[in-house]
Amino acid sequence: MDKVQALFEAAVAARQNAYAPYSGFKVGAALITPSGAIFSGANAENAAYPIGTCAETGAISAMIAAGERRIADILVVADGGVLTTPCGACRQRIREFAKADAMVHAAGLGGHRASFTLGQLLPEAFGPDNLTLSEKNASGDCERN
Ligand code: THU
C-alpha cells in the first residue's frame, strides 16, 4: 500500500478514539519511521484545558515507547474546511526527531489534501543540533542519543 494511504488509515483509526469532549475537534496522527513502522495517536483533552495533548504528541510517544527515534513522514487528519497542520508546539516536537526534509501531510476525512516539508512549516528551526554543538555538550557533560 502507498505510504501516505497507510498513514491516513492509521490516523483515521486513531482519530476515532480521540478524546475531545471540550473542543469537539477530533484529530488523528500517524507517523512512519525509516524502518517502516507506523505509530499513531489521537488528541486527549482534559478538564484542565491547557494540559490536553495533541494527536501528534501521542504518536511521538508511541514511537519513543517502541524504541524508535526518527520520523520519516507524519500525517495529521481532522475534519473541517480549513486544512489542519500541526500546531506550533507540535512542529517543534516533530523537529526533535525529524530533519527539515521530513514530510508532513495534512488530510481531511476524505483523504490526503496537502504535503509540506518540515522545513516549510518550521523554517530555521532550533533543534538537537544546536545543543550538540554547544560548549557544554561538546565537553561531554551531557550525553545525547
Ligand atoms: N489538535 C491536535 O491534536 N493536533 C493539531 O495539530 C491541532 C490541534 C487538537 C488539540 C485540541 O484537542 C483540539 O485539536 C482543538 O485545538
Image: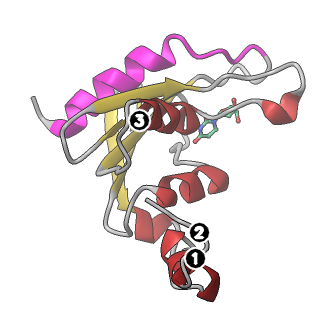
Q: Badge 1 is on which residue?
A: 131
Mark 1 residue type: Leu
Q: Residue at x 21, y 48 (%)?
A: 34
Q: Residue at x 59, y 50 (%)?
A: 90
The first of marks 1 and 3 along the sequence is 3
Q: What quarter of the picture does the C terminus occupy?
A: bottom left
Q: What quarter of the picture does the N terminus occupy?
A: top left
The first of marks 2 and 1 along the sequence is 1
Q: Which of marks 1 and 3 is in front?
A: 1
Q: Is the residue indicated by label 1 positioned so its CB lies within 8 Å of ligand 1?
A: no
Q: Which of 47 and 136 is in front in this view?
A: 136
Mark 3 residue type: Met
Residue 101 part of the magenta-drawn span: no
Q: Badge 3 is on which residue?
A: 63
Q: Badge 2 is on which residue?
A: 142
Give the magenta-colored segment's residue range.
3-21
> Is label 1 in a helix, a strand or a loop?
helix
Q: Position of residue 8 (x, y in %)?
A: 31, 29
Residue 9 part of the magenta-drawn span: yes
Q: Which mark is residue 23?
A: none
> Is label 2 in a helix, a strand or a loop?
loop
**Label total for image:** 3
Q: Is residue 125 left or right of residue 107?
A: right
Asked whether disc 1 touches disc 3, contact meaning CB atoms under 8 Å apart, the reply is: no
> Is label 3 in a helix, a strand or a loop?
helix
Q: Nearer the viewer, mark 2 or mark 3?
A: 2
Q: Is the residue indicated by label 2 positioned so its CB lies within 8 Å of ligand 1?
A: no
Asked whether disc 2 touches disc 1, contact meaning CB atoms under 8 Å apart, the reply is: yes
Q: Position of residue 14 (x, y in %)?
A: 45, 18
